[in-house]
Image (spheres, rainbow, N blue to C red):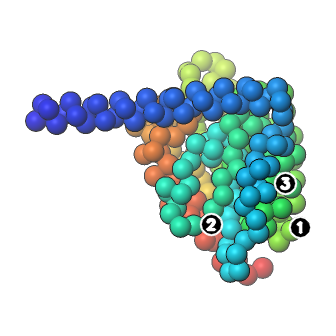
């Protein structure tokens, strides 16, 4: 029994170390990208060119966002689905908006999953107001709709990086932004997926079992999010508008 416990503990520790190393690599890649390409316009250019148009009958879906989506192993969560990851670690909604045409529209998807805003709140690249973040999200949805692409909005995840006064202010902004996203999606006929409620603990952060750093989901966290976003995509694609 003791050996089994030790083996399970070692396996969990190894998984955490792998996830941590991946985040460190993403952080370094992000810092270099800010110097070379601050808006991420070239980040996926080769991948986009190699991808080509959807096959006949293919209902491609593009996931656009920050590190939350970039860290998501989409083929692992959704095997066989033509779902494309276009997340970039550290990105804010202004950066996502600027690359929306080349990383979403030119790929001719049937739907786009949009998940972003936490880095706006955290001041990762400038300090946009909540209204400006909302405007950026709305602009992406309008661009998608104009190109007959269905929109799936995902709420911002809880953020438990620290429990300082700054964190409390950030937590309130996350709730306010999520309320706006849900209302905007409902008002405009877009699909809305509530990541926040599914991942929140009693303290307003994320449980350690779902997030090692309080910001990014672990595999157990993505396992919770996967059926939620899958249902949101199915709803969007079933809309006959």
Q: Is the residue marked by circle 3 packed among few (<14), some (14-19), or many (20+) residues within 10 Å?
A: some
Judging by the rendered image, the residue that carries numbered circle 1 is: 146
Q: Is residue 230 above or below residue 170?
A: below
Judging by the rendered image, the residue that carries numbered circle 3 is: 102
Q: Is the residue marked by circle 2 packed among few (<14), some (14-19), or many (20+) residues within 10 Å?
A: some
Q: Position of residue 24 (x, y in %)?
A: 58, 27
- Earlier in the chain: of badge 2 and badge 3, it is 2
Res. 126 in view: yes
Report helix, strand or loop for mark 3.
helix
Indicate which label's residue lies in the foreground, 3 or 1: 3
Choose between 122 and 109: the one closer to the eye.
109
Indicate which label's residue lies in the foreground, 1 or 2: 2
Q: Is residue 154 left or right of residue 204?
A: right
Choose between 184 and 89: the one closer to the eye.
89
Q: Position of residue 130 (x, y in %)?
A: 81, 38
**The C terminus, quarter of image:** bottom right
Q: Are marks 3 and 1 in contact (CB under 8 Å)?
A: no
Q: Is residue 226 above or below residue 15?
A: below
Calculate the distance from the C-alpha at mark 1 to the C-alpha at mark 2: 22 Å
**The N terminus, quarter of image:** top left
Choose between 180 and 72: the one closer to the eye.
72
Q: Is the residue marked by circle 1 packed among few (<14), some (14-19), or many (20+) residues within 10 Å?
A: few
Where on the picture, by quarter, is residue 102?
bottom right
Question: Residue shown at 72%/61% (left/top)?
Answer: 51
Where on the picture, by quarter, is residue 106?
bottom right
Judging by the rendered image, the residue that carries numbered circle 2 is: 82
């Amino acid at each position: 029994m003791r050996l089994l416990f030790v083996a399970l503990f070692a396996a969990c520790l190894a998984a955490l170390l792998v996830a941590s190393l991946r985040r460190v690599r993403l952080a370094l890649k992000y810092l270099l990208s800010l110097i070379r390409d601050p808006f991420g316009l070239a980040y996926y250019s080769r991948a986009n060119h190699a991808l080509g148009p959807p096959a006949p009958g293919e209902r491609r879906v593009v996931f656009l966002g920050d590190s939350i989506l970039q860290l998501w192993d989409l083929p692992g969560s959704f095997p066989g689905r033509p779902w494309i990851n276009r997340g970039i670690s550290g990105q804010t909604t202004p950066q996502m908006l600027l690359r929306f045409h080349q990383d979403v529209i030119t790929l001719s998807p049937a739907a786009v999953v949009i998940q972003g805003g936490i880095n706006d709140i955290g001041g990762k690249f400038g300090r946009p107001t909540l209204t400006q973040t909302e405007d950026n999200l709305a602009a992406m949805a309008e661009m998608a709709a104009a190109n007959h692409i269905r929109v799936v909005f995902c709420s911002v995840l809880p953020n438990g990086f620290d429990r300082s006064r700054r964190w409390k202010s950030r937590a309130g902004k996350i709730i306010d932004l999520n309320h706006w996203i849900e209302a905007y999606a409902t008002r405009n006929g877009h699909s809305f997926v509530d990541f926040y409620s599914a991942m929140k603990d009693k303290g307003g952060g994320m449980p350690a079992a779902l997030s090692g750093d309080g910001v990014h989901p672990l595999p157990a966290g993505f396992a919770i999010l996967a059926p939620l976003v899958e249902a949101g995509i199915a709803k969007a694609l079933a809309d006959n508008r």
